[in-house]
Structure formats: C-alpha cells, structure tokens
Amino acid sequence: MHQPPVPAIGRESDKLLFRPSHTTLDRAIGRTLKRLGPYLMLLYVVSFLDRANISFAKQALHSSVGISESAYALAAGLFFIGYSLCGFPSNLILHKVGAKIWISVLMVSWGVFSMATMFVRDNTSFYLLRFFLGVTEAGFFPGTILYLTYWFPARVRGQILGLFYVGIPLALMIGGPLSGWLLEIRPWGGLQSWQCMFLVEGAFAVLLGIVSFWFLENKPSDAAWLPADEKSILIDLLSAEEQSRRASGPAQILPMLRDLRVLRFVLIYAMIQISTYGAIFYLPAEISSLLHRPEGLEVGLVSAIPWICALFAVYGLPRLADKLNSHRLFAVIALLIAGAASFAFPSSGPSMGLVALSIAVSGFIAVQPMFWTFPTGYLSDRAAAGGIALIGTGNLGGFIAPNLKVMADQYFHSSHAGLYVLAGLTVVNAGLIACIVSRRPAGSPVDEKAVRTADLS
C-alpha cells in the first residue's frame, strides 16, 4: 500500500501564515486559515461572552433578585462543574459524528440556556441555569481544539491557537461595553435591562449555531473549497504527523487515562483557569472599585483596556514561540510576569492598578495557546479526543477561583487576600510548566525534501 511521504515543517513554514504563499502546502494552510480562523474565533467570542456576562449582571442580580456574594460565587463556579463533567463524552461524540453537526447542536443548546438566565428568580434557578449552561457549552472548546488538529500541522498550531484565543479578549473587549450598554438602555417588553442583556447575547449563539451547520466541514477531505492538489498535500502532512504522534504517545482512551503526563497537563491547565477566571469574574468589580463608579458603560469601556492588551499578547507571543520553537520558555515567562503583576495590583493606585491588571490578564490569556501545543503534539486519534477533553476538565479552575477568593477574603478578613492567593498559584504553575520534559518537539521534521517532492508531484 502506498504510504504518504512524511513531510516536514522547516523554518520557512514557521512563518508561512504571515507571508505570501509560494508552495502548495503554504497555499493550503493559508486558504484553510482564511476559511476557518475568523469564523471559529467569532464562535469563541460568543461562547466566552455567554459564560462571562454574569460579571456585568452581578450588581443587578443582587438588587433585583437578591443574589448574594456567596451565591454569585457558587453559581459562577457551577458552570464549570457541568462543563467539566460533560466535556469528555462530548468530545468523543464530536470525534464520531463530526464537528459540523455537533458544534451546531452545542451552540443552539447553550444559546437557549443563556437566554433563559433572564428568568432567574432565586438562588436555585440561578444555580440550575448556570450548571446547564456549562453542560451544553462543555464540548465547544475542547471540540474546537481537536477540530483544529484535523486541519493544521503542529509547527503552526501555536499561531493558529493564538488566533483562536483572540476570541477571549475580543469577547471581553466587545462584551464589556456591549453588556454595560445593554444594562443602561431603556428595557423593552416589560423586561429589566439585565434580562435584555441575557436575551440578546444568548440569541447570538443560537443564530451562529444554525449557520455553523452549513459553514463547517468535518475534515480537509470534505472541503470542496480546497483545490485537489492543496487538499492532497495537507492530508498527507496531517496523516504523517498523526503517525508520528502514535509512535511517541497514547492513541487510545485507557492508556491515555493512565498517562502521568496527561494528568500533569490537567493540573497545569486547571491552575491556568484559576488565574484566568479569578480575573474575568472580578475584573469589572475591581475596575468599578478603582474608578469609584457603579458598573455600567463607563466601567465597561475601561474594563476593555486589559483585554486590548491581551489581544496583542495572545496574537504575538504564540507566533514568536512557534518561530523559536520555545513554547515552554515563553509560557513560563508569561506566567511569572502575570503573577508578579497580580501581586502588585492590590496595593496600586487607579492608574498603576489598571496597568497591573492589563499585564496580568495578558499573561493569563497568552499562555493558553502555548500550553495547548504540548498535549496536541503528544496525543493522537481517540486519545486526542478524550485527552483534550480530560485536560479541559481543568476548567474546574473556574469553579475554584471565585470560591477560593471568597474563602481567602473571609479567612484573612481582607478584600485582597484572595487576590494574593490567586497570584501565588500563578507563580507555582510557572514552575510546573518549567518541569515539562518533551520527548520530542511537537511536529518535529523528518525530511523537508519530502514536502517539496510531494509539492511538485
């Protein structure tokens, strides 16, 4: 049986996404990026908007429904219980039925639950809606990470993931002013402004879920928009990388579950999420405190500043890490700087506090696409589907973060104690990433000549 040539990604193609295309492989990746990159980023914007918009409704939920600080923290965290429980089976379903159907189903489902948050009447209804929002949204993120491995080779995956992760700062840049504006406009239909916010922002997910069924293709072999020569060389390259991963890491579920490296990835990712959601859930409140202003449009606009900084960081750092093949080093540096900024924030004034918040948030977001190059370069086949979802259970960090902050604040009788605890965990996590030992570089080349030969065939 004919085996596809084992391609390589040389230093030239480290830069291929941001230079004019000259080879068939370059054109294939560039065309795929243009087709999938902006759309998947848009879906992630909506995903993150629907999970984080409760940070803007926090004060309204307290005054209108009586949601206390501790109830808010518990509900914010319950999202991640549902999210973590269902990510694993959801990713196995996606691996079996394909992203075209499954991502569409997930988006419509979580959009409905996001809109239903407008009907919160007490703590119990708030808890249930946040839990089921997590259940329905669980498969989107790990499913998209898996989906990207079907389309993009390993050497450029950090950049691709960085572009996908641009969705987080975009969601919070756009979502802050949008949510603040929706909270200030005159409500309609007998609704309160916070109810209008959930209705409008949840509807985005439903509409895009319907569009996704017609827009997405499962794999390159299904892509009618890829010319035959580009499709062939891209499939050959991805097939060769899959064979390479099979030779060095687990490909089936049970070996993956016993793999200590995978469990270490889960811990690292969980601690990244503790840091990230510690910022996301409390950033509007911290900005409000810095400005001595109630949460609304002004706070929403100022809260966009840290996410603008994160936008540049998440675009640039993974690209540079790909170019230098130094994902671990850049990830460690990003977390150390973010941890130092987190320690500095509580004792800073308004101006320096905003600077510290911007640096910390930038580090928390930029480290994530670099982290994902580790497991996606190690796992293959069903182990990749299950392993990525298992690592995604680290999103329990989103449950831990708000509750840990509340407990630390209460234990030490200080409103800043929780922030210091979260900052300390960020520094510890930098040490865990520094201890990752790679068996081989992700997507390591075998023979660059093979790509050129295949390109001319």
Image (tube, rainbow, N blue to C red):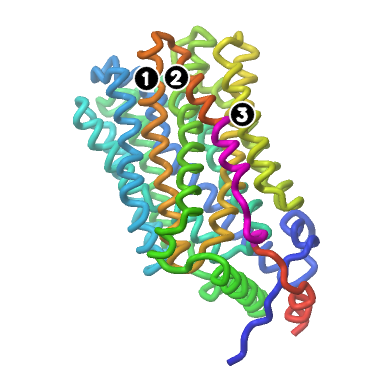
The answer to which of 263 and 445 lies nearer the viewer is: 263
Vertical order, 114 against 14 (above or below): above
Q: First in sequence: mark 2 or mark 3?
A: 3
Q: First in sequence: mark 1 or mark 2?
A: 1
Q: Is residue 437 magenta?
A: yes
Q: Quadrant of the C terminus?
A: bottom right
Residue 349 marker: none
Q: Which residues are magenta?
A: 427-442
Q: Quadrant of the N terminus?
A: bottom right
Circle 3 residue: 338
Pinpoint residue 337: horizontal percent, then vertical percent.
65, 29
* Residue count near mark 1 (Cα–Cα under 10 Å), binned few <14, some 14–19, many ≥20: many
The answer to which of 148 and 329 lies nearer the viewer is: 329
Three-letter amino acid code of the residue under disc 1: Val
Vertical order, 336 against 444 (above or below): above
The answer to which of 382 and 91 lies nearer the viewer is: 382
Q: Does the CB distance between marks 3 and 1 fall below 8 Å? A: no
Q: Does the CB distance between marks 1 and 2 fall below 8 Å? A: yes
Q: Tell me which residue sits at (65%, 64%) in the image.
A: 443
Q: Is residue 439 magenta?
A: yes
Q: Tell me which residue sits at (57%, 67%) in the image.
A: 248
Pinpoint residue 139: horizontal percent, then vertical percent.
38, 53
Q: Tell me which residue sits at (65%, 35%) in the image.
A: 334
Q: CA distance from mark 3 to mark 1?
A: 21 Å
Three-letter amino acid code of the residue under disc 2: Gly
Q: Tell me which residue sits at (30%, 28%) in the image.
A: 74
Circle 1 residue: 406
Three-letter amino acid code of the residue under disc 3: Ala
Question: What is the secondary structure assignment of the residue under circle 1?
Answer: helix
Circle 2 residue: 418
Vertical order, 441 against 415 (above or below): below
Question: What is the secondary structure assignment of the residue under circle 3?
Answer: helix
